[in-house]
Image: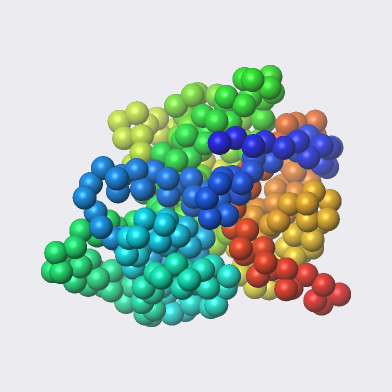
Amino acid sequence: MTIVQCLGDYKDNHLYIKREDLIPFSFGGNKARKAQLFFREINKGDYDCVVTYGSGSSNHCRIIANECCRRGMECYIISPLEASEQTFNSQMMDLFGAEITTVPVRNVHDTIEGKMAELWRENKKPYFIEGGGHGNVGTEAYVQCYEEIKEYEQTENIHFNYIFFASGTGTTHAGLVCGQLINQDERKIIGISIARKNPRGRDVVIQSIRSYLGDRVIEEQIQEKTIFIDDYTSGYGKDDRRVIETIEMALKKYGIPLDTTYTGKAFMGMSEYIQKEQIRDKNIMFIHTGGTPLFFDALKKIGEGK
Ligand SMILES: *Cc1c(COP(=O)(O)O)cnc(C)c1O
């Protein structure tokens, strides 16, 4: 599904936004795109429940819980105590009837294994999805997104010189770069990290690319094409106010919701990158990766601190 909007001139460039947040299930977003493929896998097997992992603010867990609820499937979520705050997403996970087990982050791995073993013992067939929909299935979802962007370029006779988006587990990033490597086309794909620092953050993206492409990889190209900006990773701190201002601007000027964890940071990072690198007269695409419920968590902060 492709909804690309032209937002007009932005800092001497032409800005477009791909509205992944409008994918029509459970507030959309990149996790909705990934979930479609995970549930395609689930349909192929005889699975009867899903086990996954994520925080109280996880868009991934909300969407998986929603789809499980829709199908009448049980959904088990393991959640780290250190990030178990109540959000609109966590409220919905409860509403969807997901069983949430909260444990200290160091126990997450063992708790997942324990839950899987327990379900097998009960003769259930659990399907496990990594946190954030990480893995080759998630990567595939963003190779498909890249193909949609290519199709849009062809029908609209336009070329995007830059693509920006929020990079978390790196799967979205990996899928887009894989798409580019498969098509061998020229542009800069720039992931704005929301948490991980370099070099690890970039290495995780590169590992996902290698894992997806297998023998098809050309190492120098992977190194050249994987651009991972880690200047905006602070959770709370001096950037906070600026992220809030970015969110307020996007809402007032474009009527588009952004959030403090992902899209607000990425939009701000894109803005600063354009300025710092003195980019002019280019076609720039921002991918809105979703997280609309988090916008409402952020909305409480807009207007505070003025
Ligand atoms: C999860 C998420 C991301 C990051 O995607 P990854 O594939 O994990 O890198 C970006 N934006 C939003 C809104 C998300 O929920």
Q: Nearer the viewer, residue 90 or 135?
A: 90
Q: Is residue 245 visible?
A: yes
Please provide percent x and percent y for residue 297: 65, 70
What sort of colour scheme is used for the picture? rainbow
State the image quarter where residue 305 is shown.
bottom right
Q: Nearer the viewer, residue 254 or 108?
A: 254
Quarter location, residue 51: bottom left
The image shows residue 118 at horizontal and vertical percentages of: 19, 71
Q: Residue at x 28, y 60 (%)?
A: 49
| Image coords of residue 278 (percent x, y) | 78, 40
Quadrant holding the N terminus:
top right
Q: Residue at x 53, y 78 (%)?
A: 85
Look at the picture and state if 280 lies above or below 96.
above
Quadrant for the C terminus in the image = bottom right
- Is residue 205 among what the camera can see? no
Residue at 48% from the left image edge and 40% from the top image edge: 142
Q: In the picture provided, is 11 more to the left or to the right than 123? A: right
Vertical relation: 20 (above or below) 196: above
The structure residue drawn at horizontal position 83% and vertical position 55%, both measured from the top left corner, is 252
Check the image and report above or below for 94 versus 293. below
Total numbered labels:
0
